[in-house]
Structure formats: C-alpha cells, structure tokens
Image (cartoon, rainbow, N blue to C red):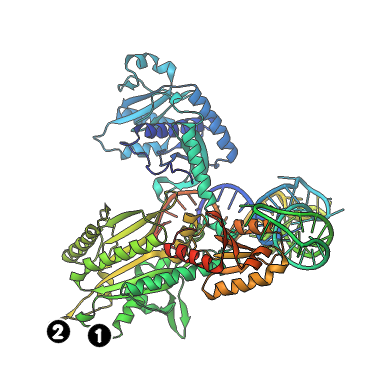
RNA sequence: GCCGGUGUAGCUCAGUGGUAGAGCACUCGAUUCGUAAUCGAGCGGUCGUGAGUUCAAAUCUCAUCACCGGCUCCA
C-alpha cells in the first residue's frame, strides 16, 4: 500500500507554500494558454487538494495535443524565472483596462468584489515595464505606477487576491503536470455558460508528484468497476440500461453474507424487519410530499386500472403506512423498523457511475418512531450500531457532520431545538468529534452524516441519521399518551450502508478485491495435482460445503502451477492442494494469499483455522 | 442533462477507404504433472445501433445508445 499524500489537503495555515505554488501554477497555466491561444478568455483558477485548475472560455475546446503544448509553454515560463509582482489597483482604472482587454468574466469578478475591499492584480514577467519599480519595492507596487500596460510575450497579469510565489522559477518543472480537460459551468451554475476547465497537479518536489501519481494508480487498481468485472461480481449492461445493477453469483454470495450479517445485527439491536412493495398509489407520494418536492428524481407514473401508480424512490411512506395500520400506545415506543428496501430514482445519464451512482438500489433503511424524550437515546443507539457494523466491515475511521436548521424549513423552533440538542447529546455521549454544518439540514429536520475512511485515505459518505418532523405531520401520525390524549411521534430515518450497491463498491475498493475470509465469494479452492485426485478433492469440498464454507474444486485439468496462478488472479484467500501424499496422509497442503504456505493440515485443522479467521473478520 | 473522449471476439487490445487480426478465455486432443502460465488444433465478430457519402466503410459524415473524465446533482 502506498502512503497517502492526500490526507491533509493544503490550506492557508498548514501549507502556505503549497497553496502559493498551486495558485501561481494556475496563473502560469492561464498565461501559457493566452500566449498560445490569445482568443481565449480567462475566468478563475483556484488551487485544489491535489493541484489547481483554470476555467477558460473559448469556442473550440482544448485537445490533448493543446495540453501538451500548453505544458511545454508552462515549462518555458517557469524556466524563464519571471518575477511575480502584486499591484494594488484603483477600481476604475483596472475596470478600464479589463474592458480594453475584453475579458467579460474578469469584469464580472471585479464587480462582485465588495466596495471596501482592496483590489489587487498579479503580474507575471513584464520585466521591461516594471523594472524600476521592482527594485524600489520588491514584489509590491503601488497604484498608479502603471497604466494601460499591454500584455505580450512574457508579460501577463490577472486580477487576483493572491497570495503567490515571488518567481515562476520557484515551481519545480518536474513536479507539475496537466491532467485533463473538462467542461465546467461558469460559477458552478448549469444555467450559465459552459467553460473549458484544465486540471493540473503540482507539488513541491518531484517525489511528491510521483507519490501522488502512484496514489492515483492505486485508486485505478482498486476501481470497483474494473474489479467487479475481473472478479465476476456484478455487471451493468447496455441492453438493460444504465444504472441498473446485475449481481452475478459471486457478488450475490457476498451480498447474502452482508445481508445476513445486517439482519442479525438489527434483530440484536431491537429492530423488527419489514418488507414493503415496490410500487404504490401516487396519492401516497402526494401525501408524503415527494411528488411535490422530489419529483425530478422519480420515474414516470404508470397507470393501473385508471389509478396512477408510482415506482418507489423512498421507503419511508411505506413504513409510515405500516405504523398507521393500527393505533399505538406510548408504551410501544420506540418502534424500530428496518428494511432492505429497493428504490428507483431517476438520475441524469451523465451522473451514473458504476455501483456508486445508480438508478435502482437497495437501501438498508430503518425508521424509528419515538417520544420526544427518547430521541437522544435512540440516536445514541443508532451511532453505536453504526460503529459496530462499519467496524466489522473494516472501517474504523469516520468524519462526522451535524447539519442544522436551514432557512426554509418546517416545524417549530422548540422542536428543532429539541431534535438538534438530542443529536448533539448523542454525539457527545458517543464521544465523537463532529463538524457542524450550519443550515445544512433537510427542510424537515436536522441530521448526522458519517463519512468512512478507506484503506487509502479516501472518504465515502454512507451513513445518515435524520430526524423528521414533516412526515408524521403530513400523515397525521399519532400515539395514545399516558393521559389518553393523541400525540405526534417523532420519526428518525437512518441508513448505515446507505445503499448496498454503493457500499459493495466501497468494499471492493477498500479491500482492492482481496476480501477477508468472512466475505470472500470463494473461500477455499481445492486443487488436484492430477486427475487421480479429483474425486478425493470433490469429496472434501462436499464436506466443507456442508459445514457452510464457500468452496470449489478446480476441474480445469491444468498443472498445479497454472491452477495456483488462476486462484491467485481470482484472489481466492485459501487454496488446498490435493496430491498423492495428501490422499495417503488424509491431509491438505494449504496455501493462503496473505501468509503463503501453511503446510500440511488435516481437514479439521483447516476448518479450525478458517473458523478463527472468519470470526475475527480479518484476512487469513 | 451539459462539455470533451471512447466503443472491433467473453476479456485486453492491433487494424486510417479495398478479403476483419493477436494474446488470454472457451472447446477438443495429447500430456498426469507438486505451489503464479505444458503443447497442438479448433470455435468465436452484420467492427455499439441506425441512416448517409462512395464502385467499395471498422475506417468519412450525421443521429442515437452506452461507457470514461469532469460540471451540476446525489445513497
């Protein structure tokens, strides 16, 4: 495994130098582009976690060949070691210059800078015109010292707040690379013009660049789409349509293990399990508000005997209906109902991505109906269950976010305060640090989101816990309180995996397809050295299968070396060689992916060993 | 949905207007083999789909679908 170079993204306090480097590199990119392709308009060019990008407006998009030439020009600018000089400018003067240059986006940026903020620009080069000034006041020049300086060869400037390096030569020409071209909307707004974005990466040393590129390769090696095909776990087929997942036998075996584990964990944690339909009368979705607020993600309705029916994008209304099926006493609460509920959501074609973003997926959904004073305890319980489940799947590091009341929301101040306090109380009781996302909650209630960190330091959003004041209201849910009055229960939505499909994808990437024994689709493969041992191997396989192991025999008739190679490529954790010796001695020659050869073991010894490893949920 | 790219055998990929190829996989035969590839033969493709240009299209044009990299959105 490579060490992660991405764990601490640069920020102004932790990596001032890297920030300047990246920001300046973006400017050098823009300068190179405008030198080579002068008709290109500049917009913005910020730094990112791994480098920088710059958005340009031009008629013809950049080609890969353009990118190569731009990179060469950037190297030239870097090697020329041009000075970078900040100038504080007068607003009207710079406006005139920008207008003269014909840079509409820069003008828009200028106009959006508050009146009381100073306006600065950064020159790169321009040595002829700036020379005297540079000596007088290194890297900073006052307003009015320059007027109407045309840009030209080795003279370029951009309206920018900085900060920047002092010379382009401070960029190591072997520590940067342009990466890709992509479309991006002006100001991130899809109703605004689409620009051409060039992504680049830059580091302080070539070694850091290399580490980053290695990390990128590592991510590519772990890509669940690639591994999913190689290991024959799942497919998404053009004939069926995008975003629809086919779980192949090996993927299905794993899903079964995951689901069995999930069901047991939930039953143990005091949940009941539900099964609900995949479609329902549209009126239900009108009552829930989804038809009004979530319609763009819903598939079209279908007509069934003059009634409109809807494929479900959510499970919650079904659980509410189940609750409504009879009257509830306060003594029954909290009610915890969980379901592996398959939902269908319309996603725009461009956003589909392997198992991570699909159109049909199964949520590990649950709803808790409880009294206001039970909310904190229930949330705490959910946090515990979440930690238990995620850590059993190998995820022990989390980032936790608490999202509070947004501007537009339903519910009284009192109930929002109660719910938010309950979430905070639960997080504190759990002892988890969290980041507060002020106003980031849903319109119907506050929430906690949990991101898990995988083996190479990437974060994935899975679990979410949301308090909901809206649905109980809309469905007029109630319970009978101790005094005989009808009261409204509080509803908590929560998912731990989020979606089985996405979680499976994350598992594949986290383990790079090398699954721990308890999850591996094939746990053991028996390899007969020659045809004479096939029957013996088959008999042993049958025994193992009866004990619940996922086991196969290699019937290829290939030589042992080839059988081992095949098993290794399929990332099978345990292979057991059966030759003449093993038949005579009633043993197996065991070899594991993680630890190499374990030597001769009896069938019983192998089972004991595997059982131990399975219980630990670790690799063998 | 938008911008750019890609689509040839089950998989990975050659093939730039003139008879569709390789390796692996698969099937068959020979070999009966001891810890990451035994040898040989065979099977396999209306070149994503549909129009068009041309005497002739995998190759050029247009449309469409899917995928890839992003944007926007999100479990």
Q: Residue A60 appears in which quarter of the rendering?
A: top right
Vertical relation: A177 (above or below) B31? above
Left of A451 or right of it: where is B30?
right
Identify which residue, B23 or A540, lies in the foreground. Answer: A540
Total label count?
A: 2
Judged from the image, the secondary structure of the residue bearing numbered disc 2 is loop
Image point (53%, 54%), residue name: A595
Q: Position of residue A240 (x, y in %)?
A: 58, 68
Q: Position of residue A103 (x, y in %)?
A: 42, 35
Identify which residue, A308 or A377, lies in the foreground. Answer: A377
Vertical relation: A92 (above or below) A553? above
Q: Which mark is residue A484?
A: 2
For mark 1, does the 10 Å Cα neighbourhood hold few (<14), some (14 to 19), or many (20 or more) residues?
few
Q: From mark 2 to mark 1, how far is it between C-alphas?
A: 12 Å
Question: Looking at the picture, do discs 2 and 1 lie on one chain?
Answer: yes
Q: Which mark is residue A118?
A: none
Vertical relation: B30 (above or below) A487? above
Q: Residue A578 appears in which quarter of the rendering?
A: bottom right
Asked whether the beta carbons under mark 2 and mark 1 sit within 8 Å of each other, the answer is no
Image point (24%, 56%), residue name: A431
Query: In this rendering, does residue A236 appear at all?
Result: no
Left of A592 or right of it: where is A315?
left
| View extreme (left): residue | A483
Host chain of mark 1? A
Identify which residue, A596 or A441, lies in the foreground. Answer: A596
Q: Of marks 2 and 1, which one's residue comes earlier in the chain?
A: 1
Host chain of mark 2? A
- Which residue position holds label 1? A327
Q: Position of residue A436 (x, y in %)?
A: 26, 53
Query: In this rendering, does residue A529 appear at all?
Result: yes
């Amino acid at each position: 495994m490579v060490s992660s170079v991405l764990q601490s993204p640069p920020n102004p306090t932790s990596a001032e130098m890297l920030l300047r480097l990246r920001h300046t590199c973006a400017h050098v990119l823009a300068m190179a582009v405008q030198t080579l392709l002068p008709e290109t308009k500049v917009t913005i060019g910020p730094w990112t976690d791994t480098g920088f990008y710059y958005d340009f407006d031009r008629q013809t998009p950049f080609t890969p060949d353009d990118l190569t030439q731009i990179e060469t020009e950037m190297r030239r600018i870097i090697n020329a070691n041009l000075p970078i000089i900040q100038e504080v400018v007068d607003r009207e003067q710079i406006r005139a210059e920008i207008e003269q240059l014909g840079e509409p986006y820069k003008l828009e940026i200028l106009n959006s800078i508050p009146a009381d903020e100073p306006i600065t620009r950064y020159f790169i080069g321009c040595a002829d015109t700036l020379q005297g000034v540079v000596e007088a006041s290194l890297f900073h020049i006052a307003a009015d010292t320059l007027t109407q300086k045309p840009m030209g060869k080795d003279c370029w400037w951009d309206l920018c707040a900085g900060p920047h390096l002092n010379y382009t030569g401070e960029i190591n020409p072997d520590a940067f690379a342009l990466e890709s071209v992509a479309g991006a909307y002006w100001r991130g707004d899809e109703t605004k013009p689409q620009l051409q974005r060039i992504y680049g990466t830059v580091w302080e040393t070539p070694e850091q660049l290399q580490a980053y590129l290695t990390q990128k390769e590592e991510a590519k090696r772990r890509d669940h789409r690639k591994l999913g095909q190689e290991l024959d776990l799942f497919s998404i087929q053009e004939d069926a349509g995008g975003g629809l997942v086919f779980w192949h036998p090996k993927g299905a075996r794993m899903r079964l293990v995951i689901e069995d584990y999930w069901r047991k964990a939930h039953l143990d944690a005091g949940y009941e399990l539900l099964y609900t339909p995949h479609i329902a009368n549209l009126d239900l979705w009108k009552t829930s508000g989804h038809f009004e607020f979530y319609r763009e993600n819903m598939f079209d309705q279908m007509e069934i005997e003059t009634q409109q029916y809807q494929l479900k994008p959510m499970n919650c209304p079904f659980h509410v209906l189940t609750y409504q099926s009879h009257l509830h006493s306060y003594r029954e609460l909290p009610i915890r109902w969980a379901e592996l509920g398959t939902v269908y959501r319309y996603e725009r074609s461009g956003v589909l991505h392997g198992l991570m973003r699909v159109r049909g997926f199964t949520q590990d959904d649950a709803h808790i109906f409880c009294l206001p004073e039970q909310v904190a305890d229930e949330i705490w319980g959910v946090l515990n269950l979440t930690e238990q489940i995620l850590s059993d799947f190998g995820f022990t590091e989390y980032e936790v976010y608490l999202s509070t009341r947004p501007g537009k929301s339903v519910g009284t101040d009192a109930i929002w305060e109660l719910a938010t306090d309950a979430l905070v109380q639960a997080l504190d009781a759990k002892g988890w640090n969290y980041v507060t996302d002020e106003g980031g909650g849903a319109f119907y209630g506050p929430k906690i989101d949990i991101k898990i960190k995988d083996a190479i330091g990437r974060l994935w959003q899975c679990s979410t816990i949301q308090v909901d004041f809206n649905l109980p209201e809309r469905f007029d849910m109630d319970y009978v309180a101790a005094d005989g009055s009808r009261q409204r229960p509080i509803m908590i939505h929560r998912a731990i995996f989020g979606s089985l499909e996405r979680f499976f994808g994350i598992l594949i990437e986290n383990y790079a397809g090398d699954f721990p024994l308890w999850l591996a689709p094939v746990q053991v493969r028996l390899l007969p050295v020659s045809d004479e041992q096939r029957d013996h191997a088959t008999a042993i396989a049958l025994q193992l299968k009866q004990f619940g192991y996922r086991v196969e025999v290699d019937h290829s008739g290939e030589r042992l070396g080839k059988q081992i190679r095949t098993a290794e490529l399929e990332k099978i954790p345990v292979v057991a060689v059966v030759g003449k010796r093993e038949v005579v001695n009633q043993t197996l020659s065991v070899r594991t992916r993680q630890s190499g050869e374990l030597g001769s073991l009896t069938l019983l010894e192998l089972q004991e060993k595997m059982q131990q490893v399975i219980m630990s949920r670790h690799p063998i």
